[in-house]
Image (tube, helix red, strand yellow):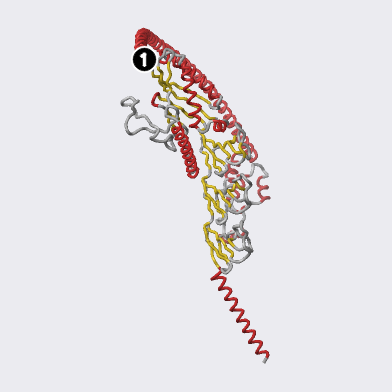
């Protein structure tokens, strides 16, 4: 009974546990689960916990309110009874940008300070570079601004906006407010615009070009195109901001003074007709209300001038100059120039143009009107102007390279007589030069005739020398050929003699060989004949030697009886023919027969 009850209780407990697990999984998966997508974050708000102090905005673990740390990308599980969440985009700073953070949480700043360090409340001094950041939007505000891109050919002059004021006439040091001595070279910088102000100024050559009463222009360096699209766009933004600042300066100057009191204006070419002071048919003049000081961003930037160079000569005539002054700001001096005078328009307005007008009037008043028309006087005035202008502006850290006089305008009543006199002098010089030219032409014709005569003489002499050299060469060649033939004949003669001697010696040797060989052969034959006893025996022996070695002689007896019976017991001595051969071979004498009987017949 108890066992059955225990089993039933166990089954019930297991079922309850399984139901609890299933409910917990369903609760977690369907009610507590949420997903934070890419480039987003989740801001959590705790519904339970300790209350926040009055000065605290973001809650820490265990406190009630918006939690300081947001959740990153991915899957998360939070109890909806205890928490609320909101998925918001993360802070993404693209390339070429930086983030300026304003913290709403942290410790309070010291009195007088407006830039905060991390952990303090206020605008952070440091910036955020390109990247992705999870900063709680309740406690932090991120302002995305352009990074500072200093274009090629420019430098950035830095003005510190925080700290104590620097001493009068001194550069700002660390922690001080004012213009800093170190400048930014071309490149990309992540600068807090609330901490530093950066002004870009041109380095290298700039021009002030003056064109009489029509005014003039300051031609500055334009933006250089690069292959980096982001850097190109940022540099363009920086230069447009520079143009805007310069335009604001010009507008303020125009409001403070009349066009006759300021040298810089912001005009463009008028489209509504000509000015009253301008000659009929000339290009329309520019007025301060009709445009901007700069044109283009990728071309040369042009700043228009309203002043012109005009002064009385030594003899009281009014002189107007068209001139161009080329000047340069060196990188090492550009911060000093900016601290003292300001941006390029201010430098031109306050320093360069007043010095050009002052030096031109001072130097020009010591020259007569005629000297500005005659070449030597004009060149001397240009050299004096450049030397004086360069010396004065060098003391103000501005380097002058050239001061060129392009055109000089003098009154017509003095210009006509001077021009007529100059034309008469030029005509006289022209006639003299024509006479000199005619004389030189005659001399030239004479010299050309002499040259032709000398050329003909040289040609004939050359032909003669060529013929003589050719004859001499032919003679030498003929002599060489004759000598060669003689030497060949001598060699052939010697060769024939050698061949004859060789043939004779070869014949003698062959004859001697034949004599020796045949003599020895004859001697051998004589010895053989002597050994055999008679020539007939020698002849028979020679015949026998020449017989075939396999030759067999069968001798048939022709005596009484039958052939077959006699052949079995027949001997050579019994045959009549054999006896005749023995007698012929035996030497003469009484013992020949006995010797033949003793040896028996040959077989």
Q: Which residue is mark 1?
A: 415
Residue at image position (59%, 31%) is 513
Residue 1 placement: quadrant? bottom right
Q: Which one is in front, 461 or 466?
A: 461
Where is residue 171? Give x, y as percent.
60, 34
Q: Is residue 429 above or below residue 152?
A: above
Q: Which one is in front, 278 or 472?
A: 278
Farthest-out residue, bottom: 1
Does the image show residue 555? no
Pointer 1: residues within 10 angstroms few (<14), some, or many (20+)? some
- Left or right of 443 in this view: 79: right
Q: Which one is in front, 430 or 360?
A: 360
Residue at image position (37%, 32%) is 269
Where is residue 561? Give x, y as percent.
57, 60
Q: Which one is in front, 262 or 441?
A: 262
Residue at image position (50%, 24%) is 401
- Left or right of 299 in this view: 603: right
């Amino acid at each position: 009974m108890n066992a059955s009850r225990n089993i039933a209780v166990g089954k019930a407990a297991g079922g309850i546990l399984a139901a609890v697990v299933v409910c917990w999984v369903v609760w977690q998966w369907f009610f507590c689960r949420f997903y934070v997508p890419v480039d987003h974050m989740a801001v959590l708000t705790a519904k339970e916990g300790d209350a926040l102090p009055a000065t605290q905005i973001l809650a820490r673990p265990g406190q009630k309110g918006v939690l300081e740390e947001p959740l990153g990308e991915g899957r998360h599980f939070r109890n909806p009874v205890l928490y609320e969440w909101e998925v918001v985009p993360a802070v993404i700073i693209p390339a070429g940008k930086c983030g300026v953070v304003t913290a709403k949480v942290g410790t309070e700043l010291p009195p007088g300070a407006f830039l905060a360090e991390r952990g303090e409340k206020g605008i952070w001094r440091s910036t955020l570079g390109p990247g992705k950041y999870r900063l709680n939007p309740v406690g932090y505000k991120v302002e995305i601004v352009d990074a500072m891109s200093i274009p090629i050919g420019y430098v950035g002059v830095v003005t510190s906006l925080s700290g104590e004021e620097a001493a009068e006439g001194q550069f700002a040091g660390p922690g001080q407010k004012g213009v800093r001595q170190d400048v930014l070279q071309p490149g990309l910088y992540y600068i807090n615009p609330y901490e530093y102000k950066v002004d870009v100024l041109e380095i290298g050559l700039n021009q002030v070009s003056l064109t009489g009463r029509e005014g003039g222009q300051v031609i500055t360096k334009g933006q250089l195109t690069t292959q980096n699209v982001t850097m190109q766009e940022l540099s363009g933004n920086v230069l447009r901001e520079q143009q805007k600042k310069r335009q604001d300066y010009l507008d303020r100057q125009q409001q403070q003074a009349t066009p006759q009191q300021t040298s810089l204006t912001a005009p463009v070419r008028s489209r509504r007709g000509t000015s009253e002071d301008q000659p009929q048919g000339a290009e329309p003049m520019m007025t301060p209300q009709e445009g901007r000081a700069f044109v283009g961003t990728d071309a040369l930037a042009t700043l228009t001038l309203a002043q012109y160079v005009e002064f009385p000569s030594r003899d009281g005539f009014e002189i107007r100059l068209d001139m161009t002054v080329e000047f340069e700001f060196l990188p090492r001096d550009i911060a000093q120039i900016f601290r003292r005078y300001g941006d390029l328009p201010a430098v031109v307005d306050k320093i360069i143009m007043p010095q050009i007008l002052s030096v031109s009037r001072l130097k020009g008043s010591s020259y007569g009107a005629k000297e500005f028309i005659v070449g030597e006087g004009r060149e001397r005035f240009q050299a004096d102007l450049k030397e004086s202008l360069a010396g004065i502006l060098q003391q103000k850290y501005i380097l002058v390279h050239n001061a060129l006089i392009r055109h000089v305008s003098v009154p017509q009543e003095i210009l006509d007589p001077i021009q007529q006199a100059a034309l008469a002098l030029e005509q006289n010089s022209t006639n003299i030069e024509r006479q000199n030219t005619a004389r030189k032409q005659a001399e030239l014709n004479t010299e050309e005739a002499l040259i032709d005569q000398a050329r003909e003489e040289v040609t004939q002499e050359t032909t003669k020398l060529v013929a003589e050299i050719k004859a001499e060469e032919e003679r030498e060649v003929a002599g060489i050929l004759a000598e060669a033939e003689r030497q060949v004949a001598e060699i052939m003669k010697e060769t024939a003699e050698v061949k004859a001697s060789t043939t004779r010696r070869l014949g003698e040797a062959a004859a001697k060989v034949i004599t020796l060989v045949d003599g020895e052969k004859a001697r051998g034959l004589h010895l053989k004949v002597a050994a055999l006893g008679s020539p007939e025996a020698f002849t028979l022996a020679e015949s026998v030697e020449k017989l075939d070695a396999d030759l067999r002689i069968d001798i048939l007896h022709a005596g009484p009886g039958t052939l077959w019976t006699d052949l079995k017991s027949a001997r050579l001595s019994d045959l009549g023919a054999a006896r005749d051969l023995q007698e012929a071979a035996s030497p003469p004498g009484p013992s020949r027969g006995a010797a033949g009987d003793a040896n028996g017949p040959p077989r």
